[in-house]
Amino acid sequence: MRLVVDLNKCQGYAQCAFLAPDVFAMHGEESLIYNPRADEEQRERLTRAVAACPVQAITADGLDGAAGEPVTGSAGEASDAR
């Protein structure tokens, strides 16, 4: 599965690093580093990390969203208004 973090949006709250430490880590107090190609066994942790991002900076392709769409923050809801 493929991860993309909008580093311009990321505010360094580190919820993702807390929930999926094998994928996300903080470098210093504000810089996020992450593995863009996460292993399948990280699926559950990544789902929680994406949902926990308070600024919805993380997009994950391969985590089953509604109708196969990529999952973004806020409990996996797509960011567009429907």
Image (tube, grey):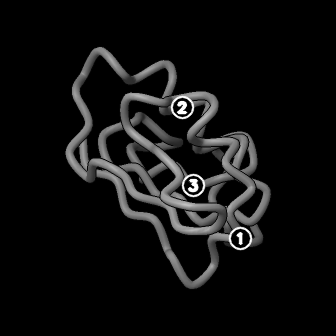
Above or below, 74 relative to 29: above
Question: Which residue is under mark 1?
Answer: 11
- x, y (%) of residue 80? 68, 72
First of labels 2, 3 by sequence position: 2
Left or right: residue 50 versus residue 51 is left
Q: Name the residue type under label 3.
A: Thr
Task: Compare residues 18 and 70 and report the one nearer the observer.
Answer: 18
Q: Which residue is mark 2?
A: 47
Q: Residue at x 63, y 70 (%)?
A: 10
Specify which label sits upstream in the sequence, 3 or 1. Answer: 1
The image shows residue 75, relative to residue 53, as above or below, that is above
Numbered mark located on residue 73 in the image: none
What residue is rendered at 20% in x and 45% in y?
Answer: 37
**Disc 3: which residue:** 72
Q: Amino acid at mark 2?
A: Thr
Residue name at image x 56 percent, y 84 percent: 8
**Of the residues under marks 1 and 2, which one precedes in the sequence?**
1
Q: Tag 1, which secondary structure?
A: loop
* Residue 75: image location, x then y, percent: 72, 40
* Percent coordinates x, y for residue 43 in the rendering: 39, 23
Label 2 crowd bin: few (<14), some (14–19), many (20+), radius 10 Å: many
Q: Secondary structure at mark 2?
A: helix
* Position of 52 relative to 5 (above/below): above
Kindly indicate the quadrant of the structure image that contains residue 18. Answer: top right
| Dot 3 alpha-carbon crowd within 10 angstroms: few under 14, some 14 to 19, many 20 or more | many
